[in-house]
Amino acid sequence: MLALMIIDVQQAMFGAEEPFRGDTVVTTIADLIARARAAKVPVFFVQHDGGPGDAFDKNSPGFAFHPAVAPKPGDPVTIKRRNSGFYDTDLDAKLKAADIDALVICGMQTEYCVDATVRSAFERGYRVTIAADAHTTFDSEILPAATIIAHTEHIWNGRYARLKQASEIAFG
């Protein structure tokens, strides 16, 4: 069975520096969520807790999901403390309990938490599709965000996942 997974689209990502195509990516993720819900496809959320003093501290405003893509009551939410949504969390158990074997993954940040979760999902035998226009990151000191995204997608495609534009993803 298929599920949609949203990774770390949290308020702390939208501070002084804006993510590359941030508003467009959030709108695309919100559309994916709406289409998944309409097709009765479960939506799983992964949320980063950076610990005390971090922008993602569970007691800080940055911990909250972006309001456009926030979970509804009853949606499964996994809190993580490392890059991968699977590392030392209950995510794999939740997915297995729901009989999930395929994932559509989107979220933030491409080269960190999304990448680590994609690779971990692949290693656990999940069939992974990346919504190519529904993940993003920031410029780094050495590469622009667009290059980081293109390079990471090149590594994923055909190895760990397949890439599709969000509009090409069918939940029905």
Image (cartoon, helix red, strand yellow):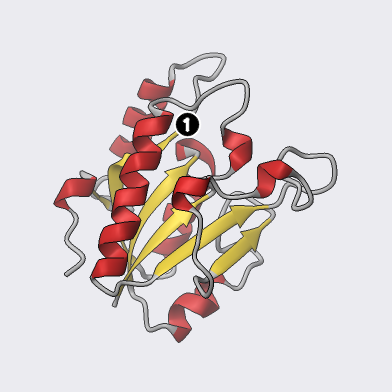
* 94 sits to left or right of 90: left
Quadrant containing the C terminus in the rendered view: bottom left
Q: Residue most toward the right?
A: 52
Residue count near mark 1 (Cα–Cα under 10 Å), binned few <14, some 14–19, many ≥20: many
- Residue at figure coordinates x 43%, y 31% from the top left: 22
Q: Residue most toward the top?
A: 142
From the top left corner, tell me how far across and down residue 68 is, in percent.
Answer: 45, 47
From the top left corner, tell me how far across and down residue 39 is, in percent.
Answer: 23, 71
From the top left corner, tell me how far across and down residue 119 is, in percent.
Answer: 44, 54
For the residue labelled by badge 1, is the local secondary structure a helix, a strand or a loop? loop
* 129 sits to left or right of 69: left
- Residue at figure coordinates x 49%, y 52% from the top left: 7
* 158 sits to left or right of 24: left
Q: Is residue 155 something one can see in this rendering?
A: no
Q: Nearer the viewer, residue 57 or 148?
A: 57
Q: Which residue is denoted by mark 1 in the rendering?
A: 137
Image-quadrant location for residue 16: top right
Q: Is residue 142 above or below residue 148?
A: above
* 114 sits to left or right of 153: right
- Residue at figure coordinates x 48%, y 37% from the top left: 111
Quadrant containing the N terminus in the rendered view: bottom left
